[in-house]
Image (cartoon, rainbow, N blue to C red):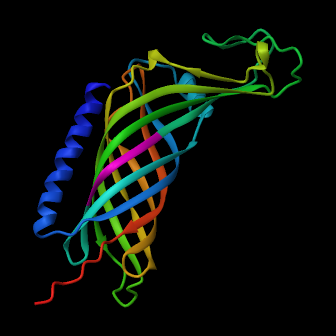
Amino acid sequence: MNSPFKFLIASFVLLFFAISGKAQSSLLLNYSLSIEPTIGNRVISYKGNYPQSFKDSIKKADRSRDAISMAFMVSTKFKSNNRFYIGLQFQNFGFTRKKDNLHFLDTIHPDIGIMNDLSQTGGAYVDFNYRYAYLAIPMLFSTQISSKKKPNTLVHFIYGGSIAALLKHDVRAVLHGFSTRGNQKIYTLKNPGENVDRINVNLHAGLRIENMLYNKSTWVFVQPEIFVPTLNANSSNERHHLWAIGLQVGIYYVPQFKEDKK
């Protein structure tokens, strides 16, 4: 387990127990569990001088990549319409780079080799899926913006940030229209030249729409949001700033306690 990952887990444990200790005296903790389909891409900055034609070719080859993230969050109210959230979130970000117009004996990738499939008749290409997996601690705030006249449906504006430790980075190459020896069409490449950074920080913003499911304790929610990076994901000459748009879908649990009778 790498040092940033240990630090992140230790920070979460300390913060969680600090909030829990406060909650025993004055705060009520609520819990959220969600899954989040995302669409991500990158903004590139370059170290060094590259011709515009090279940058244009990279821009043309790159496109968005879909993925799945998930989160467990605890929250508490600190004003009548405001909440604070903290938790653990698995963030799956990245993008896809397409290499097309491949012909017989063209180099697919140094770790894959050359194209030796004579059966393909055109349209051969490879999707290189750049995958960055993080474990993050989000710290978010929300403000209720819906009317109190509809207590069973609540809408919140949510904002904040997260600090994330890299769990894994690789490139998943998927061959289309041809295969290599052994009919292999999928390769997982380690990509050490990417020089990935172990820590990243993202800004979050979005809406949270909650609807009561059972009594006042169990709610379902959807949360469209955007992740904006503040740091590079890597430190090679081609540097990636990973952004994503997601839609959290989950369950929100609000414990109900009976008041003590005097």
Residue furthest front in the image: 262
Tell me where residue 165 sits by quadrant: top left
> Horizontally, is 221 left or right of 198 in the view?
right
Relative image position of residue 193 (x, y in whole percent): 45, 15
Identified at 42% across, 53% down, the residue is 226
Residue 241 on the magenta span: no
Q: Nearer the viewer, residue 48 or 216?
A: 216
> Horizontally, is 140 left or right of 60 in the view?
left
User: Above or below — where is 157 with respect to 191?
Assistant: below
Q: How many marks?
A: 0
Relative image position of residue 104 (x, y in whole percent): 81, 12
Relative image position of residue 78 (x, y in whole percent): 18, 70
Q: Main secondary structure of the magenta part?
A: strand
Tell me where residue 98 sits by quadrant: top right
Stretch in magenta = 85-92
Identified at 45% across, 16% down, the residue is 192
Identified at 76% across, 23% down, the residue is 101
User: Above or below — where is 251 with respect to 40?
Assistant: below
Tell me where residue 181 sits by quadrant: top right
Relative image position of residue 1 (x, y in whole percent): 32, 26
